[in-house]
Image (cartoon, grey):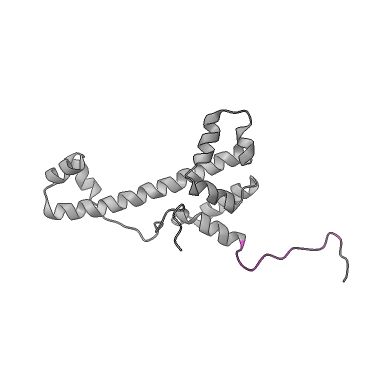
Amino acid sequence: MERNPRGDKLQPGPASSTADQWTRVLAHRRKDAPTTVAAVIERFEAAGVTPDQVASHLEDGGDRLYAAAASAAEGWAAGFGGERAVALLAAEVSALMSHLVARAASVRSVCVEALLDEFSAVTVAGALGVARQKVYELARPSVDPAYLTTTPWRHHE
């Protein structure tokens, strides 16, 4: 065996590349431009945050980050990689939640449109607790196939 100090390189594992891991973890960003997603990944990597760390915080909806911040204990962010990492993780939890809000709104739109086929806007508005004018705004059905089919915290076998 030849020695090659400082010249040995680790070969990437065949099973799951880092790019594949980021794609899986950031699935809620499918609608974002590839350059935007690349910039997000770059910021995470610059802060030393791994795809598994991001996944962990998305799966708990930011609960651990919130609990630590609410504790106001000195240095609370250090356990998560510091303030920069926490700010990025919190922003990603927010991006996921925004995606889920849009997904839920699309489901509501489909239902409101269906209700308007059978009932007046006044009746639908009363049943849903919204203004009559809002009913027409809500009735724009669009279940985009780019929405996540399941939340990160729900695992299917």
Q: Is residue 6 magenta?
A: yes
Q: Nearer the viewer, residue 104 or 141?
A: 104
Residue at image location 21% in from the left, 51% down from the top: 112
**In the image, is residue 5 above or below residue 54?**
below
Quarter that holds the N terminus: bottom right
Magenta segment's dominant SS is loop
Image coords of residue 99 (percent x, y): 41, 49
**In the image, is residue 41 above or below residue 76?**
below
Q: Is residue 89 left or right of residue 156?
A: right
Question: In which quadrant of the rendered view does residue 22 lie?
Answer: bottom right
The residues colored magenta run 5-17
Residue at image location 20% in from the left, 39% down from the top: 129
**In the image, is residue 56 above or below residue 16?**
above
Q: Is residue 77 magenta?
A: no
Q: Nearer the viewer, residue 52 or 135?
A: 52
Q: Nearer the viewer, residue 137 or 2?
A: 2
Image coords of residue 103 (percent x, y): 35, 52
